[in-house]
Amino acid sequence: MSKKHIVLHTAPHVKKPQDVPTIMRNVVYALLPIVAFAVYQFGISVLALVIVTTLACLGTERFFNWMGNKPSSLSDWSSTISGILLALTLPPGFPLWMAAVAGIAGIAIGKAVFGGIGYNVFNPALVGRAFVQAAFPVAITTWTPAFFTGRFSEFVPSSLTAPFMMPPETAEWVKQVAVDGFTGATPLSLHKFQHISTAPFDLYTGMVAGSAGETSALLILVCGLYLVIRKMMNWQIPAWIFVGVVATSGVLYLINPEKFADPVFMLFSGGLMLGAMFMASDMVGSPLTPKGVMIYGLLIGFLTVLIRQFGSLSEGIMYAILLGNAMTPLIDTWTQPRLFGARRKSA
Amino acid sequence: MSLIKQDDRITVDTFLEGIWRENPVFVMMLGMCPVLAVTNSAINALAMGLATAFVLVASSLLVSLFRNLIPSEVRIATYIVIISTFVTIVDYTMQALSQEVYNALGAFIQLIVVNCIILGRAEACASRNKPLKSMVNAAGMGLGFTLALLCLGVVREILGSGSLFGLPLFSEQFQPWVVMVLPPGGFLVLGGWLLFFEWLKTRKQYA
């Protein structure tokens, strides 16, 4: 005697479980190809970098759970993302002990002090990077060549620096391994300090020096697209950032093409893709309303170009996103939609 | 004036209060300006702490001696005059002892005049208690302030310059954490210590 069950259910009729761990796990999936490409490009140093930062982030998260007498929050994957993202923003030959410091600082100052996931004002990975940028300004701007021979069997010499010690000079080593006259500069610093531009095709595919995971714009776009298709990321945020970058650098380029870089170069060089796709779109630190997202994206794009062209650093996306994060509560307050039926404010 | 008669007895707690239970920096969060500004090395922290402690003890004594003579309408102005007398003494003494430390501390020596810990002690303790008790209490507060400054200064100097009281602790290969001797380092280390003490407190409550 079989009886057919008809389940009656009130709205919302959600079919997919879209909770925090699911979304975060998918972000990790989206990041894995970028990690794989970074390892292929820079060798085992980057692999070690990813492992160290991720462990440092997870360890710090667990430590603060223990300190606050709270259950472990490691299973929501958010610290794993912070660790991987942090490693991707660091130079490939960054000393591992400094990477651990960055991970600890990122989770401790960027996340735990605000109360953990969902309460952090800033993106933890970027807070960690900003901390080491302020603490170790030399090491974080020392770049190593991509695709050097023997990258799968030996570390970059500066990677294995003993804790609290200064990394060794890599100039000699770079001369030995570099295929063709590598100067240790990223496309952005080449443009800024030596006025040499890099071919756009190399920028799309990632055949350049730079931070571990920022080199291939195309790969980052594809990985980000996966999250957009699964509706786990607000595509408007990176889109508005791109608009902001193109508009600002376009105006500058029209004023003086000699001095300022063209918009295409601006869009595909440096950490802009990685930052726009995976860091600015962080659900906690970005505005909620469509109008707010527009202001937020344009602001980040504008600030990035401003810092790149007029600041003392060659890359500006990190501080631009952190400033955007700081503006988010204000933007959200400004752009609250009018309640239906509520009276318009008399202008 | 408070109607409750103050207890005149001097207990161990009169002294220890300023070091632990009511530590001016870590519990009362007073005098943040010198705490953040001059703790980039242990020597600076110690000099600043001792200078403040001296002014604190000496002005507490004087305020307490004159507590029945000072009209309450102009008491703050009177306290400031008394405090600035001792700050001037410290200022000249510091200059005579070590020009280097004096230069490092800069305006913060003169700014002890408006340090709220000292004014707070004068108002809350010295103006209501007998000289000896005020002095013991002020000495505890001064020591607590000095220890707190040292807590920050030691951490910032070890990480920021790899040395302690000017003596190098590591080999020459040491990588200094630039951020630690800059202003953000002061905020970060202060936050770290506050977190640590708060954690100790809550742990005691739950245990």
Image (cartoon, rainbow, N blue to C red):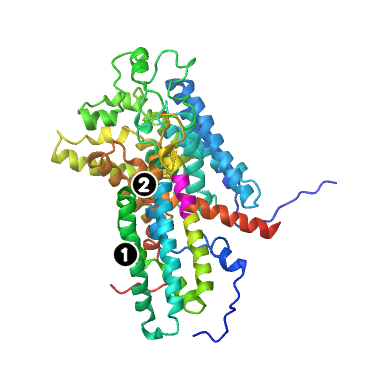
* Dot placed on the residue nearer the N-terminal end, 2 or 1: 1
Q: How far from the left and from the top, in percent, is residue A89?
A: 41, 34
Quadrant position of the C terminus of chain A in the picture: bottom left
Residue B86, compared with residue A137, is above or below; it is below
Magenta residues? B148-156
Of residues A220 and A70, the one nearer the viewer is A70
Identify which residue is drawn at 42% across, 30% down: A213
Quarter residue B36 falls in: bottom left
Per the picture, the main secondary structure of the magenta-coloured stretch is helix
Residue A222, compared with residue A330, is above or below; it is above
On residue B88, the disc is: 1
Residue B187, compared with residue B114, is above or below; it is above
Residue B82, compared with residue A30, is above or below; it is below
Residue kind at label 2, given as amino acid type? Leu
Would residue A338 appear left or right of A309 to someone viewing this image? Answer: right
- Residue tagged by mark 2? B182
Q: How far apart are marks 2 and 1 (CA)?
A: 28 Å
The residue carrying pointer 2 sits among few (fewer than 14), some (14 to 19) or many (20 or more) residues within 10 Å by Cα, namely some
Residue B184 appears in view: yes
Tell me the subunit letter for badge 2.
B
Tell me the subunit letter for badge 1.
B
- The reply to the same-chain question for discs 2 and 1 is yes
